[in-house]
Amino acid sequence: MNIRPIHTEEDYRAALKDVSVFFENEPEPGTPEGDYFDIMITLIEAYEARHFPLDLPNPIDAIRFRMEQSGLSAADLAPAIGRTNRVYEVLNGKRALTLPMIWKLHELFGIPAESLIKPMKSV
């Protein structure tokens, strides 16, 4: 096994090329090939996290995504946010989420709390 840290874009491309053969026929865990694949994937993920970080969505986008994903309406969010007019105020960026709203949205609808606590930009 030729395992090295991934420092450059060239190293990254080479690592992707090396493991690409395993994506269609993933090796058995615990075998030399499986160990190589696991180690390389870990190195690739670490490089990507450092060089291509994903930003969390803003709270409104996170809520709208969950609504679309689960077929929810504004009325369905009322138990977490309050009356329907308050739900619309939040969705339109006119009202900030409160900590109890964030907790209820997370608890009732599984929206990641990290996304909900990100500061909203007003409309």
Image: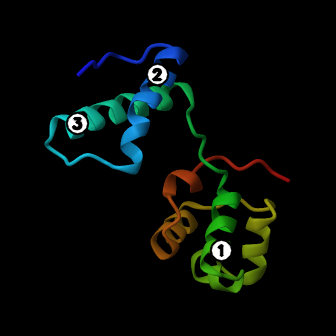
At x 81%, y 61%, the residue is 94
Q: Say which quarter of the image contains residue 63.
A: bottom right
Q: Residue 76 location, x and y as percent?
A: 64, 84
Label 1 SS: helix
Which one is nearer the viewer's eye here, 108 or 46?
46
Name the side, left or right, on which 42 lies relative to 115: left
Q: Earlier in the sequence, mark 2 or mark 1?
A: 2
Give the mark nearest the N terminus, 2 or 3.
2
As shown in the figure, which amino acid type bears the numbered disc 3? Glu
Please rate how many residues cluster around mark 1, counting C-alpha atoms within 10 Å: few if below 14, some from 14 to 19, many from 20.
some
Q: CA distance from mark 2 to mark 3?
A: 17 Å
Q: Residue at x 39, y 34 (%)?
A: 19
Toward which corner of the image does residue 65 lie, by quadrant? bottom right
**Which amino acid does the dot numbered 2 rest on?**
Ala
- Whether label 2 touches label 1, CB < 8 Å: no
Rendering quarter of residue 43: top left
**Mark 2, residue position:** 14
Element at badge 3?
A: helix
Q: Is residue 76 above or below residue 9?
A: below
Going 70% across and 60% down the picture, which residue do you hit? 60
Q: Residue furthest right?
A: 123
18 in relation to 97, above or below: above
Colour scheme of the rendered structure: rainbow
User: Could you tell me residue 120's position as x and y percent?
Assistant: 71, 50
Q: How many marks?
A: 3
**Amino acid residing under circle 1:** Met
Q: Secondary structure at mark 2?
A: helix
- In the current view of this chain or complex, which residue is farthest to the bottom? 75
- Name the residue beneath numbered marker 3: 33
- What residue sits right under mark 1 in the picture? 67
Q: Position of residue 37 (x, y in %)?
A: 29, 36
